[in-house]
Amino acid sequence: MSYIKATDVLPEEIIEIIQNYIDGEYIYVPRKESNRKGWGDNTNSKEMILFRNLEIYEKYKEGAPIGHLSETYYLSPKSIQKIITKLKLKNQKIK
């Protein structure tokens, strides 16, 4: 997130009104609901995590112990268990 000087984009009247509430401080203006993006929409993070989770599940099905998967992927055993459970349930619904 970058900062934009208010004097570069806002009329002086609006700046004066804002200064009545907050003077010389930083303020965050949230996006409109219609312009919001979901997590990972700007990157391929979602796809990378999905690929990783599928890889974890496949290795688990091939017999890899949860402790080994935890060390390999730098995740807690509980996180590995959640990934496996989620993908097991997903696979059961597909069948």
Image (cartoon, grey):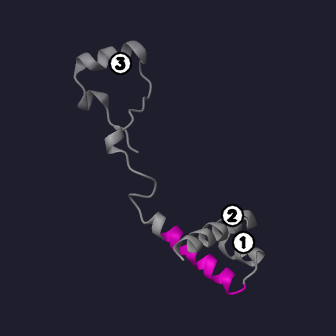
> Does 64 sit left or right of 18 as displayed?
right
Give me the residue at 30% from left, 29% from top: 6
Q: Residues within 10 Å of mark 3 (few under 14, many from 20)?
A: few
Q: Which residues are magenta?
A: 48-63
Cβ atoms at labels 1 and 2 below 8 Å apart: yes
- Between the residue at mark 3 and the residue at mark 2, the CA separation in whole angstroms equals 45 Å
User: Label 3: which residue?
Assistant: 18
User: Upstream in the sequence, badge 1 or badge 2?
Assistant: 1
Q: Position of residue 71 (x, y in %)?
A: 73, 74
Q: Position of residue 81 (x, y in %)?
A: 71, 67
The residues bearing labels 3 and 1 have C-alpha atoms spaced at a distance of 50 Å
Q: Is residue 44 left or right of residue 83?
A: left
Question: Which residue bears the numbered disc 1?
Answer: 70
Q: Amino acid at mark 3?
A: Ile
Left or right: 57, with 44 as reference point? right
- Residue occupying the point 65% across, 73% down: 73
Q: Which mark is residue 79?
A: 2
- From this viewpoint, which residue is outermost toward the left? 11
Tally the numbered discs.
3
Q: Amino acid at mark 2?
A: Ser
- The answer to which quarter of the image holds residue 74 is bottom right
Q: Could you classify mark 2 by the number of other residues whose Cα lies within 10 Å: few (under 14), some (14-19), or many (20 or more)?
A: few
Q: Is residue 46 magenta?
A: no
In the image shown, does 81 or 52 lie closer to the viewer? 81
Q: Secondary structure at mark 1?
A: helix
Mark sitting earlier along the chain (3/1): 3
Above or below 62: residue 95: above
Check the picture and name the quadrant holding the C terminus: bottom right
